[in-house]
Image (cartoon, rainbow, N blue to C red):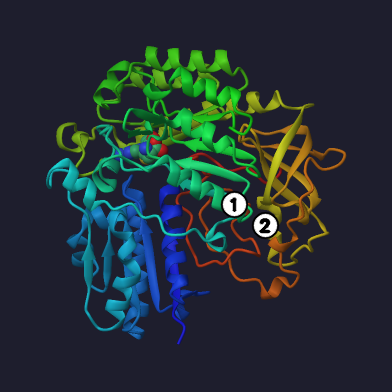
Amino acid sequence: MTKRLWIETVGCQMNVLDSELVVAALRRQGWEMARTTGEADAVFYNTCSVRQHAEDKIYSALGRIRLEKQQRPGLVVGVLGCMAQKDQELVRKRAPWVDLVVGPGQLHRVPGLVDEVLAGGGPRLEVSLDRAGGSREAIAQSFESYDPDRDSQMRPTPFQAFVRTQTGCDKFCAFCVVPHVRGPEQAREPATIVAEARKLVADGCREITLIGQTVNSYRWKDGSTTTRLADLLVLLDGIDGLDRIKFVTNYPRDMTDDLIAAVRDLPKVSHYLHVPAQHGSDAVLTRMKRGYSIGEYMEMLGRLREAIPHAAVTSDFIVGFCGETDAEFQTTLDLVRTADFKNSFIFKYSPRPGTKAFDRQPDDVPEVVKKERNQALLEAQAAVSLAGNLRFIGTRQQVLVEGLSVRDERRQGENPPSTDGIAQLQGRTMCDRIVVFDAPLRLVGRLVDVDIQAAGAWSLAGDVADGLADAVPLEHLFSDDAAAAPPTLYDIDLTKSDLRKNAITKSGLTKSDRGRPSPSGKSDTTPADTSAGA
Ligand code: SAH
């Protein structure tokens, strides 16, 4: 009998991609997606460890699924991803009803492991070596790259896809657990990345977002030739049928002139750059072990803006990091007020076991102060974002239409629009600005020109200009019979309207965090207002 899977995902784009790949691999073995946990033979949680909040959510979900497991002891419960790698045996100590604990470097084993559990083989724990668990080579090998064939059915939209450039991270920022749970940085071969992109484009994909923990540190050495991100962008830009290329997340020190020139000169590369500053004060950046001063960050930003004046730059910030004084926080506030970020993703510091800050620096900023600073920074960024968006009124922007706006997505349940019916749609400009506009649903997946009429802090609103920028029919994206449409795969907040497309098979992947999604799907504080535009 067909087995059914339910999977929930929290965290960054890496997790979204990992879930896509795990689901695709299981589907190739005959699994189908469950509509509820109640009809699932296996329930998986693909987890995140970047902040405590993300872990707490998974442990509460495990508490809830325990009741179902009591009713149906044959249900396989799996914890995948970063929390599995971080907590290892602790997962089953806290939740003994979990059958599978599989780290991000062992995901290729999931299909075999589920079969073993179903055959009565008992619980399984498969994780990679700790960062101190052997030679660099041995550790790297224990984090195996997971590159099975892609499956467009498994993405939030068939015309957008993440492509991994590298796994792991070697930056070891004092606050961050990522290098510990995702292992050493390992680049994928350029030919593999390009071949995957070509295949995605042949399958109808129009926009590719390259993902790596610090994507602009990409480096592949082959004999005397070194391929860096700028070179990779040149290769990808040459793919016929691909319209847009984005990449996240960037490390400020690796924002080299050749990369900036590639972004400026290659027509398909989005002029949108997520380059987290994390803080405005040199003293705090030193405590964070970020490896640059605020002067160096501003110098980088200056080079970027000189080369591409209209580039949209976004940042991440941590408030309430160990020892952060009022005066130090003020420097972050000043930076946000002056640096003209399109958006910032703001996080309250959450101490992570295993990191240098956890071991050596007390988490001494009270929660109430973290909250106040979070709010103050959010308000400062909202004012800057609004001012930035107002500049777009009266301009014509090319928009890749992603789906229904948040407002119409909510309405869809009661009264689903037909493909020719006018709905409020949502898409993104080349600079990653969200645009809402009324248009027929069949424009989803296409590039259209929109005349911008109004602006809010987090989105623009406008009217579709005469004619279409592009008229490739993509009607196959939609089922005429909405009632028969399979549920969508993701509930992650990439853009909300991506997520319940008719063409996408869903099982309840949950939203990573509250608020508007960040480039790494990781915002927990930035408010969402993508429904109405102005
Ligand atoms: N390298 C990736 C993933 C890092 S996690 C990237 O840069 O996107 C994403 C963001 O979460 C970081 O940029 C940082 O702002 C925030 N973050 C990381 N560790 C954190 C912690 N311990 N507490 C609060 N925020 C954290």
Residue nearer the viewer, 65 or 199:
199
Of pointers 1 and 2, the one earlier in the residue sequence: 2
> Residue 147: where, in percent of width, then height?
40, 55
Which residue is under mark 2? 409
Residue at image mark 1: 496
Vertical relation: 224 (above or below) 16: above
Q: Is residue 255 left or right of residue 272?
A: left
Residue at 39% across, 20% down: 280
| Residue drawn 82% across the image and 43% down it | 468
- The answer to whether any part of residue 350 appears in the image is no
Report if the CB atoms under discs 1 and 2 are less than 8 Å apart: yes
At a point 40% along the width and 40% down the height, the residue shown is 212
Mark 2 surroundings: few (<14), some (14-19) or many (≥20) residues within 10 A: many
Dot 2 falls on a residue whose secondary structure is helix
Quadrant housing the N terminus: bottom left
Q: State whether residue 63 is above or below residue 291.
A: below
| Quarter of the rendering occupied by the C terminus | top right
Confirm or reject: label 2 Cβ below 8 Å from ligand 1. no
Circle 1: element type: helix
Residue 480: tell me if it is visible: yes
Position of residue 242 measured from the top left corner of the image (x, y, whole percent): 63, 43
Residue 441, given in percent of the width and then of the height, sits at 76, 55
Count residues near mark 1 (Cα–Cα under 10 Å), then give few for <14, some for 14-19, many for 20+. many
Residue sitting nearer the eye, 380 or 492: 492
Of residues 453 and 482, the one drawn nearer to the viewer in this rendering: 482
